[in-house]
Image (spheres, coloured by chain):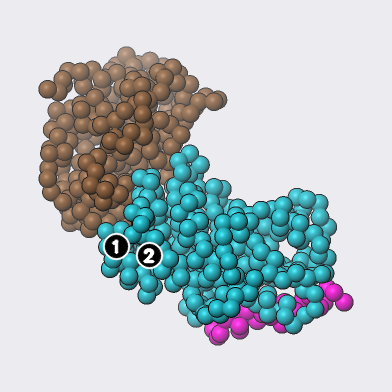
Chain colours: A cyan, B brown
Amino acid sequence: MMNNNMQNRAMRDVFIETIYNRMSADESIFFLTADFGSPYLDQIRKDFSDRFINVGIAEQNLVNVATGLALENCVVYAYAIAPFLTMRAYEQIRTNLAISSQVRPLNVNLVGVGAGFSYGLSGPTHHCYEDLTIMRLLPNMVLFSPSDWKLAEGFVDYSTKVNKPKYIRFDGKAMPPIYDIVDDELLSRGFCELVSGRKVCIVSTGYMTHKALEVAKGLKDVGVVDVFMLQTLCEEGLLRVLKKYELIVTVEEAFVGKGGLDSLVAGLLRKNDLNIRMESLGIGERYVFELGPREHLHEINHIDCESIASTIRRHMM
Amino acid sequence: MTDFNLLAEKAKWIRRKTLEVHQIAPETRVASSLSCVEIFAVLYYGQILKYNSKDIFWSDRDRVIISKGHGAISLYPVLADLGFFEMGELDRVCKKDSFLGAIPDVIIPGFETTNGSLGNGLGVACGMALALKRRKRNEKVFVMLGDGELNEGAVWEALMFAGEHNLSNLIAIVDHNKIAMLDYCENIIDMRPLERKFEVFNWNVEKADGHDIRQLHSVFEGFLEQNNDSPKMLIADTVKGKGVPSLEGDSLCHIRSLDANAMISAINGL
């Protein structure tokens, strides 16, 4: 699974670059932004000016205009900062995407940048720890939370083919790749056991998968499962993997116990009467005004590598 | 030639059927549905709209979005009459297994979108108009708004957008019946002069008596003939509860239902 090309790249850059490469051949693709940029976006703006639209700082209209384009069979990417895309325009997403798409297929791809603490220094308005929960709440949506730029790259063709509304949760930071080959089979499955362990398994999503891999390196027999589809994943497959463990530790840059990754895993175990011990790490019941590097914000919330490792050690002794 | 007598007859029939639907389903918003009867009559029977009830997603159709969804029960009889669904469905509004609810949804043939949430129709219409324009298609996008709905911020995001992007294939109609749920609109947020608000955002605004079929027809024809870059807006001066004296002029008529006796006198009074 590990890649030789270890170049650090931001998910959104690779994603937008790949979309750019598809836009000549596929004239149905529109790229909308709520005045939010990326170096690669300038290229789309320049070469596809009739299908690049900056709606202004107006997330509600971003989603509404995207809906109208999709009703006319366009493939639409609607790009904004994650918390504002999901929370300012939540009702538009619910009404026009989740509700309407149950009757009329709509290919709207909401591309939110700034998962978790990506914008750590900008304070709680720009942190995003609610989106996994609130987007998972909506039926008929695909929820994609990739851990690396390879997944982001591979998701572009998948997103044009799967005629459904989707929420894509990108981290803001450039990171090394985790995956090598990303195909439809992997994307439909929605998760990957990156490290096979024996007793303990860390289940994580997004940025935290990099931390999970770090923790697993320092401990013996600890497995890592990366879940990147939080709505449309192969539950039986995930269950088969989780069954072999005695302890599952979920880790996410999201509020804990509120319906995110931990709830997904807990629900799966409960539904199948599996009595596996589970520990959930995530953001506690408060907003984070503290400043400092991302690691510091993780320490405050006990989701740093040492906290994850000590949680595992505590349970395994 | 437009047969204005026919349009007048149709309007009268729509109003009567709307009251009958309300009789079957008191949950429907009758006053709000009565103010836009003539607008629907002119659009659907006056050769303004292109539609095909046998092929509801016909690519040459004009798109219609009813953003003030609750106030469009009067469109049910029109769509039934034109064959979008069986006339018998009107007897089952809000009943078990009917697809005609108190607020029209995307499941109803003839409705493009989900309409229960105010403020979103214009933005969606902008997206449709933009797609059609980029493909150099001639179809128009009509969107019906309520005046109370204009308090929604998303409406203004879309108004600015349409003007900026020269969506000349977009025709918005404000059913200006002057009453929201709890009060007269001007007592809530006084938006007068309304037309100026739209004009400064590059909209081509016309005003008409929303119950005068000839005036409405002339404005719509004018819009269709215009060859400019502006989105079009009709402010239709209407009366909420039009045709039912006990509703007209009642600032709380939005939430009024007519009881059996009131209904009989309303229908007889038309």
- Residue B62 lies, with reference to residue A239, above or below; the image says above
Q: Are marks 1 and 2 in contact (CB under 8 Å)?
A: yes
* Residue A126 image offset from top left, x and y in percent: 48, 72
Residue at image position (72%, 52%) is: A236
Residue at image position (29%, 35%) is: B61
Residue at image position (66%, 64%) is: A192
Using the image as rendered, state which of residue A157 and residue A56 is in the foreground. Answer: A157
Magenta stretch: dominant SS?
A: helix
What residue type is disc 1 on? Phe
Which chain is mark 1 on? A
Q: Dot 1, how many residues are within 10 Å of its Cα: few (below 14), some (14-19), or many (20+)?
A: some
Using the image as rendered, state which of residue A47 and residue B76 is in the foreground. Answer: A47
- Residue A159 lies, with reference to residue B25, above or below; the image says below
First in sequence: mark 1 vs mark 2? 2
Q: Is residue B172 left or right of residue A316?
A: left
The dot on residue B33 is none
What residue type is disc 2 on? Tyr
Using the image as rendered, state which of residue A86 and residue A22 is in the foreground. Answer: A22
The dot on residue A48 is 1
- Residue A173 lies, with reference to residue B93, above or below; the image says below
Q: Is residue B188 left or right of residue A115?
A: left
- Residue A199 lies, with reference to residue B16, above or below; the image says below
Q: Which residue is mark 2?
A: A20
